[in-house]
Image: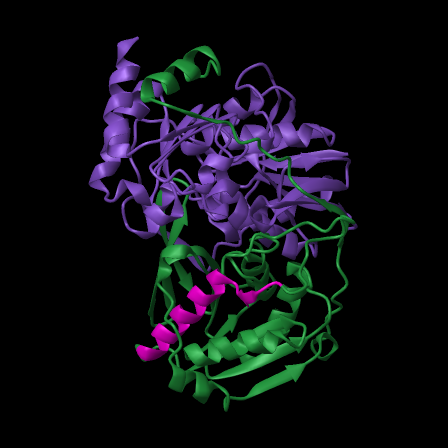
Chain colours: A purple, B green
Amino acid sequence: MTALVLLDHENGRIKQPSRSAVAAAAKLGEVHVLVAGTDAGAADAAARLPGVARVLRAADVAYDHALAEPLAALLVSLAGDYSHLLAAATAIGKNVMPRVAALLDVQPISDIAGVESEDVFVRPIYAGNALATVRSADPKKVITVRAASFDPVAEEGGSAPVADIPPAGGGERSRFVSAELSKSERPELTAARVVVSGGRGMQSGDNFHLLDPIADKLGAAVGASRAAVDAGFVPNDYQVGQTGKIVAPELYVAVGISGAIQHLAGMKDSKVIVAINKDEDAPIFQVADYGLVADLFTALPELKAELEKA
Amino acid sequence: MKLLVPVKRVVDYNVKVRVKSDQTGVELTGVKMSMNPFDEIAVEEAVRLKEKGIAAEIVAISIGPAACGETIRTALAMGADRGILVETEASPEPLAVAKMLRAIAEREQPGLVIMGKQAIDDDMNATGQMLAALLGWPQGTFASKVEIAGDTATVTREVDGGLETVALTLPAVVTADLRLNEPRYASLPNIMKARKKPIETIKPADLGVDPAPRLTVLKVTEPPKRQAGRKVGSVAELVDKLRNEAKVI
């Protein structure tokens, strides 16, 4: 039983959601990992992950933007040796793995939150309002992993051999044009220990800056509800929820967020939840460990001042 | 150019589903059903491409029980031209759905398939990618902008760190994300007109597809419930609790 994990990497580092996928794969058997693209140092970083037995490196520019078509072809070319193919349920994993599954005539198992055995997995459905335990009858399992449900393996501790593998084509009809990535000094939403999110109650994009000093003080990522994204206050990559990012930080602070089920789906596994909302009947209070009924425009400056005290 | 738009009938997005006590699934009896919201966005995008003169015809497809005909009617009222209902009792998995859509695409020869990125019932986020793979077509998933010029679709995608733009040689599959557009409400005259638009009904066997699932649902359970905590009276009390009780800051 050997599993192959497709890793997300950037600037020579393996992203945290992929380290969670390695942790999930370790429950299935021996773990090999695939690092595709010319990102210098990423394969060596992968080799240092604890529990990784072998690193496959496809150092070809064809994979530099992680386009689904060539990456899927590469994974399919390697699939013969593996019982399980996994990736984190990131934008890359969600794009590539179903394509791999279809090419292998396999029904993918998306966004798993638990591994029961080599063929039984738990996955959330209906925005996390139900958990389905499913058994796959396919000879190979193609899986994406909900990173928030598995503690990531550490970045250091392993020393796996690295093997170079040839490219596998498949990129003839798609081409990367450009990327417009948010620049932020803050941690990434899915990896942050603390997340501070704003909702429709923030009233404007400008007001979102009221969250900045608090996020800075707490070393937090800034997130948002779909309502805030739809209203144009912040870009979509801030979105926490069923169709945005799934987070499970130590501390989640929801400011001016009513708590629609689609938002709760993205954050209810956080360890401690704080809600600040002026509507005391807002559903967010039903999941919050600490609720403060207050106008956020008075509460946020007070919170900033209070955090600066100690 | 012809567009195919697959639409799924799902539990309405405002319904909070309840898990059945025998753990076989969620309660669907008497629950309001609607078109999957992401598919609505896909239909809207197709209609806009037709209004711009890029698309000539829009074919809406739904797969499932006879009631999926209503979902197709909704798409027709928004501006699709005709429908195909693949009637089957069970709701097939993405793999089988993708195979049926492939068979329809081979028959209809569309220039583009636009569909929702994910259905809000099984949350699989797979069918569009799988259809593209089976057809050997490129894919533009999680699209927030689609531009068609000649034989190229330029698709801006929502990715983890922001936006990414890819160029795809048509035909291709595009899956719609939330910000692609805001779907219109069908007007009453258009709802009336949609009643006269044709819907062809076929069976999975007509498409040569075995809809048998590969995944067996062993049980469906409720997620662990979070206990509501308590209200604090002030910001100072909140910070004190976070520091000294929860010890998270």
Q: Quadrant of residue A6?
A: top right
- Horizontally, residue A139 falls left or right of residue A22, namely right
In the displayed image of the protein, which residue is found farthest to the left?
Answer: A206
- In the image, residue A3 sits, relative to residue B243, either above or below, namely below
Quarter of the image where the C terminus of chain A is located:
top left
Magenta range is B31-51
Image x and y of residue B87, in percent: 68, 76
Residue B249 in view of the camera: no
Residue at 49% x, 41% y: name it.
A264
Image x and y of residue A224, in percent: 36, 40
- Horizontally, residue A295 falls left or right of residue A9, namely left
Image x and y of residue B176, in percent: 44, 60
- In the image, residue A169 sits, relative to residue A26, either above or below, namely below
Q: Is residue B113 within the magenta segment?
A: no
In the displayed image of the protein, which residue is found farthest to the top?
Answer: A310
What kind of secondary structure does the magenta stretch mostly adopt?
helix
Q: Nearer the viewer, residue A77 or B70?
A: B70
Quarter of the image where the N terminus of chain A is located:
top right
Image x and y of residue A53, in percent: 66, 24
Q: Nearer the viewer, residue A168 or A305?
A: A305
Q: Nearer the viewer, residue B88 or B140?
A: B88
Residue at 24% x, 17% y: name it.
A305
Please tell me how many numbered marks the rendered image carries.
Answer: 0
Residue A187 in view of the camera: yes
Q: Quadrant of residue A144?
A: top right
Residue at 64% x, 35% y: name it.
B224
Q: Is residue B42 within the magenta segment?
A: yes
Residue at 58% x, 22% y: name it.
A153
